[in-house]
Image (spheres, coloured by chain):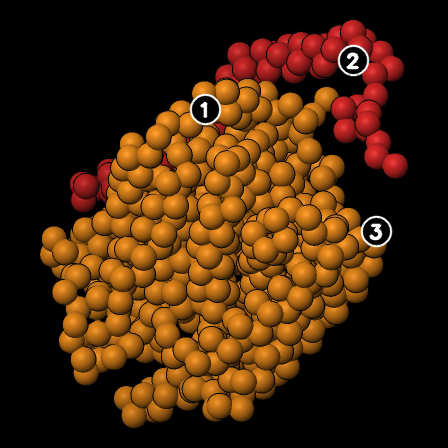
Amino acid sequence: MNQRLIGHLTLGLLLGLAQFAVMGVTAGLYVRHMRKNFDPIARRLRAQLDDDRAAEQRRAPGRVPAGRRFRTW
Amino acid sequence: MVNLSASTARLSASIADAFSLRLTFVLFLSVVVITLFTALLTAPQRDEISEFYLGNRDMSPLRNGLAMCGDYLSAATLLGSTGLVALTGYDGLLYLGGTVVAWMMVLLLIAEPLRNSGKFTLGDTLARRLPLQQRPVRLALAICTLTVCTLYLVAQLVGSIALMTQFVGEPGPTTRTMIVITIGSIVTIYAAIGGMPGATFIQVVKAVMLVAGVSVVAVMVLNRFDWNIDSLLSSATEGSGLGTQYLEPGLRYGAGPISKIDFLSLQLAIVLGLAALPHVMMRLLAPRKTRVLRASVVWAVGLVGFVCLAAGVLGLGATAVVGRETISDIDHKGDAAVLLLAHELGGEILTAIVSALAFVTLLAVAAGLTLAAASSLAHDFYGEVIRKGRAKETEELGVARIAAVAMGVLGMMFALLAWGTNTATLAFLAFAIAASAILPTIVYSLFWRGFTARGALLSLYGGLLSSVLLVVFSPVVSSTPDSVYPNADFAWFPLQNPGIVSIPAGFLLGWLGSLLSPPQEETVYQDFEVRALIGADQR
C-alpha cells in the first residue's frame, strides 16, 4: 500500500482514485445496459398491460360500476 | 515564541474578525430571504398532498440530481470530512471514498424499483407489498423514520452552534439559544409552508452554491501549487509534520484491531445507510418517469463524486498551506480546516463566503429532514394508522404542516439540550439506524418473495433497538473523556459505530420473522413485482 509510484503518489492513493474511475465506468455500463436490454421490454409489457385494460373496458361497454348498481333509496 | 503562541491563542478564540462575521451574516441572510420568498411563491396552492409530498414531478434530471446532491451533502461533508483529510491524510481520503460508493448502491439497487412501486412515502411501497398488515408496519416505519430524522436534524442544529464557535469562540447560553432558534425557525418555515417545492428550491440553490464554492477554492489551491499534484502532496506531507506517515494508512484507524473494525463498521453504515435515509428516499419518489429518475441519480453520483474529490484537495491544501498543527490547535476535530484555508487563500471575503455556504448547507439538509419526518407522520401515522385511510386531502395536508412545525420545535429543543454532543456521532448513529432498521425492510420487500409483515416488524424494531442499545453501551456514552458521561463506565461494547453488528442483526431478524410466519399469498408479490419492474403508472 505504501509503495511509492510517482513522486509522492502511493499505491494506496492510486487505488483510491481508481475507485472513482471504476464508479464512473459502472454507472455508464449500467445506464447503457438498462437502455439497451431493459427499457424495451418494460415498455412492451407496459403497452400490453394498457391494451389488456382497454380490451376489458370494451368487452363490457356501458356497464355500471359494481358499487353504483343497486342504490338504496 | 511568545509572540507566536499569543497569536495562536487569538486565532483560536476566533478565526475571523468582525468584518468577516458581518459579511457572512449578510450573505447568509440574502440567500435565506431569496429562498424564503421563492418557497412562499412556489408553495402548493391547490391543497394537493401530491404536490406537498413530491413537489414538481416533471423537473429535469439535472435539477433533480442537484436536489439529491443537496439533500445528501451536509455541512459535515464540507467542514468535517475536509478536516479529517487535513488531520489524518490517507485515512480521511479513504473515508471520502466511502461516501461516494453509497450513491452507487442507490443507483444500481434501490432507486428504480422503489420509485415504480411507491407513491408518497416508503410506507406506500410496504402497504402494496404487505397489504393485509399494512398498519402495524406503517407505524413501525414511521417510528424508525422519526428517530432517524430527529437524530440527523439535531446533528445539523448542533452543527450550527459548532460553526458559530469558529467565529466567536465558545458561545454563551444566549447566543446558543438564538442561533438554534433562528436556524430552526427558518427550517420549519421552509418545510411547513413551502412543502416539497420550497425544499427543492433551497436544495438546488445550495447544491449549486456548494459545487461552485468548493470548485473555486480547489482551483485556488491547485493554482497555488501550479497544478502539480505531486507538489501539493509533498507540501501536505511537509505541513503535516508527520513525514511520509501522513500519506499512509493508519493515522486515525490504525491503532489496533478494534479501531480497524470500527472504521469498517462506520463505512458499512455510511454505504448502506444512505439508501435508507428518509429525506433521500423522498427525492427518489419524485420524478414521474423512471428514465428521468435514472438520469437524475447519475447526475447525483457525478456531483457528489466531484464534491468529494474537491474536498480531498481542500483537505490536503489546508494541511499544505496552513499546517496540521495550527488546524488541530484551533479545533481538535479539524472542523476549522476549510475556513483557515479560505482565510489564507482569499482573505476575509472568501472566509465569509465559505462560512455562509456552510450555514446554507446546514439549513437545506435540515429542511429536507423536517419535511421527510412530517410526510411520514402525516401520511403513514395520521392518514393510515389513526384515520385508517379515510382522511381528506386537505386534512392530511394540515396535519403535515403541523407535524413539520412540531418536528422543528422538537429538533430545536433536543439541540439546545445536547449542544455539546459531537455532530458526527449523532449523524453516524442516524446512518446506522437507517441501515439496520429501514434498509433490510426495503431490500426484502423489493427483492424477496418470502418476506412477510412479521419479518418487517421484527427487522424494523429490532434494527432500531439493537443500534440504539449498542451505542448506549459503547464508549460514545461512557468510559472515555470524550463521552457523554465520562465518569461512569458501562461500555461493554468496544466500537463507536454499531453498524457491523446491528446491520446483520436487522437483516437476520427480517429473515427469521418471515420464516416463522405463514407464507403470503403468491399473487400479491407477483403484482408487486410487475409494478416494481415496469412502473405501470407511466406512459
Residue B49 visible in the shown view: yes
Front disc: 3 or 2: 2
Q: Secondary structure at mark 1?
A: loop
Q: Is the residue B134 above or below the residue A63 in the image?
A: below
Can you tell which mark lies on residue A57?
2
Is residue B66 in view from this perspective?
A: no
Q: Residue at x 59, y 21 (%)?
A: B534
Q: Amino acid at mark 1?
A: Glu
Q: Nearer the viewer, residue B77 or B49?
A: B49
Instruction: Give the residue drawn at x 37%, y 40%.
Output: B454
Expressed as whole percent of the image width and height from the top left, the position of residue B145 reads 48, 54
Q: Quadrant of the N terminus of chain B?
A: bottom left
Chain given the colour red: A
Q: Amino acid at mark 3?
A: Arg
Q: Secondary structure at mark 3?
A: loop
Disc on res. B46: 3
The amino acid sitting under disc 2 is: Gln
Which label is found at residue B521? 1
